[in-house]
Amino acid sequence: MTTFQFYRFRFHFRAISAIYFPRGKSGNVLRGSFGGMLRDGAAPAVYARLFEPGKALRNVPSGLADWPRPFVFRAAHLDGLTIPPGSDFYFDLHTFYLQEPVLEPFLSVFRRIGSQGLGPGRGQATMERAEQLDLEDRAVQVNDQPHPACAVEFEPSPLPVERVRLRFETPTELKSQGKLSERPEFPIFFSRLRDRISTLRGLYGQGVLDVDFRALGERASAIRLGHCDLRWEHVERRSSRTGQAHPLGGFTGTVEYQGQLGEFLPWLYAARWVGVGRQTVWGKGEVRVLAGI
């Protein structure tokens, strides 16, 4: 049985001063603050492991042009909100790095948000507690050591599944042949998801997946995109270092895939946790399975 293991954490805060999360940029705000504080306060090896893994890791799968970072933020529920002083808020983080220490670098940074500030106005907050979540969103409090990791099992559905309806929760960008795809045709969508999961597992977890990628891709090519109700979100961020604007948008909405989908269903469920496409580290490409029939 092939599995994919990872950790889910939820960090709870109380605002000391007002904190603003611009629309479509909450994950980017967190990623920027986290990266800056980690760079300034952590050992260089820890920063490299989380933000520059291509320089930090050895003996890993070859041929990677762009090394994925071993975590993603989940904070879209904060988009466009201003958290007033005294109010509580939270965000989630999924990390795919299974070696010790898993939790300590994140706790170390988030405990300093109160003094460093967060968001465009550098609003201050205090971290109240950290929780670990399972796949059913059940939470247990953690201190420095996590409980056992979540595990997705890539076992085909025992019953026939001929239609699957998905919702792209956050803006998603999929590339094919060097260009952005306007529609998430299943072979493109699945190949990006399959490669991401395999790469994360190979770099940070249990090793490269023992899967016949070619045969899986051939069967994926027979899956059709049926109903498709998408809209494009246009958001930009501006780099504080270079001043350049970078797009953060992509498509959101629902699609339905049709065909023999039983073996693909576990992979589609996993897309919620790992994300798919570009800029997943700050929450893009979150996908949810709405129904499998």
Image (cartoon, rainbow, N blue to C red):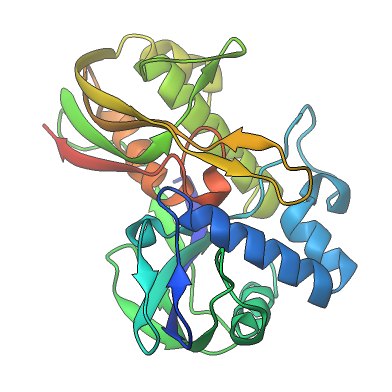
- Residue shown at 61% from the left, 58% from the top: 31
Residue 154 as seen in the image, left or right of residue 136: right
227 vs 1, nearest the viewer? 227
Choose top left, top right, bottom left or bottom right for residue 231: top left
**Whole-percent x and y of residue 124?**
55, 82
**Whole-percent x and y of residue 112?**
65, 84
Instruction: Work out whether 258 lies above or below 58.
Output: above
The answer to whether residue 102 is visible is yes
Choose top left, top right, bottom left or bottom right for residue 123: bottom right
Total numbered badges shown on the rendered structure: 0
162 vs 156, nearest the viewer? 162
**Whole-percent x and y of residue 172?**
43, 33
Instruction: Work out whether 28 lies above or below 262.
Output: below
- Residue shown at 69% from the left, 75% from the top: 105
The answer to whether residue 42 is visible is no
- Residue shown at 40% from the left, 42% from the top: 271
130 vs 121, nearest the viewer? 121
Q: Locate the C terminus and report the quarter of the image it occupies.
A: top left
- Residue shown at 63% from the left, 44% from the top: 238
